[in-house]
């Protein structure tokens, strides 16, 4: 039986750059939205949670699990075909927790642009 880490799908995910990470202040993810979905984590446990998954036109994916980012996405309500830019604007350590703040710009199909800056 092959080792988990040698699995072709795991190796492809690692090398493809398919998934975006917002790790450091200033990291940006931007593109046209091709698909919106939900991603469940820890399903069936007491730690079950749902994140928002955005697939961009280039087939790259951002899984938005941070509470503040999900709140802003629900507020802006971007749709398929809209353009979105998400920047990690601040990271604040609060004991054992990490609070990330974002700047999100949403341009809808009509060309209207809306921005939420969580650091302001």
Image (cartoon, rainbow, N blue to C red):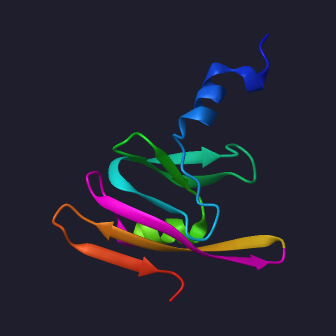
Q: Position of residue 117 (x, y in %)?
A: 46, 81
User: Residue 64 is drawn in which quadrant?
Assistant: bottom right
**Residue 62 falls left or right of residue 32:** right
Seen in the picture, residue 78 relative to 104 is either above or below; the reply is above
What's the residue at 33%, 44% (across, down)? Answer: 57
Q: Position of residue 88 (x, y in %)?
A: 55, 69
Pick the residue in front: 56 or 17: 17
Magenta-highlighted residues: 75-95
Magenta span includes 32: no
Pick the residue in front: 75 or 15: 15
What's the residue at 59%, 46% (across, down)? Answer: 40
Seen in the picture, residue 16 relative to 88 is either above or below; the reply is above
Q: Position of residue 62 (x, y in %)?
A: 50, 51
Q: Position of residue 99 (x, y in %)?
A: 68, 74
**Residue 18 falls left or right of residue 58:** right
What's the residue at 50%, 70% (across, down)? Answer: 71
What's the residue at 30%, 57% (across, down)? Answer: 79
């Amino acid at each position: 039986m092959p080792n988990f880490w040698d699995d072709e799908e795991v190796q492809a995910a690692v090398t493809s750059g398919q998934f975006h990470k917002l790790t450091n202040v200033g990291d940006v993810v931007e593109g046209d939205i091709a698909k919106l979905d939900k991603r469940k984590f820890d399903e069936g446990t007491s730690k079950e949670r749902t994140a928002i998954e955005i697939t961009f036109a280039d087939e790259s994916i951002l899984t938005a699990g941070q509470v503040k980012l999900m709140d802003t996405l629900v507020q802006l309500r971007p749709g398929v075909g809209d353009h979105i830019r998400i920047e990690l604007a601040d990271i604040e350590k609060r004991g054992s927790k990490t609070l990330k703040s974002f700047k999100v710009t949403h341009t809808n199909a009509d060309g209207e642009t809306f921005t939420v800056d969580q650091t302001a």
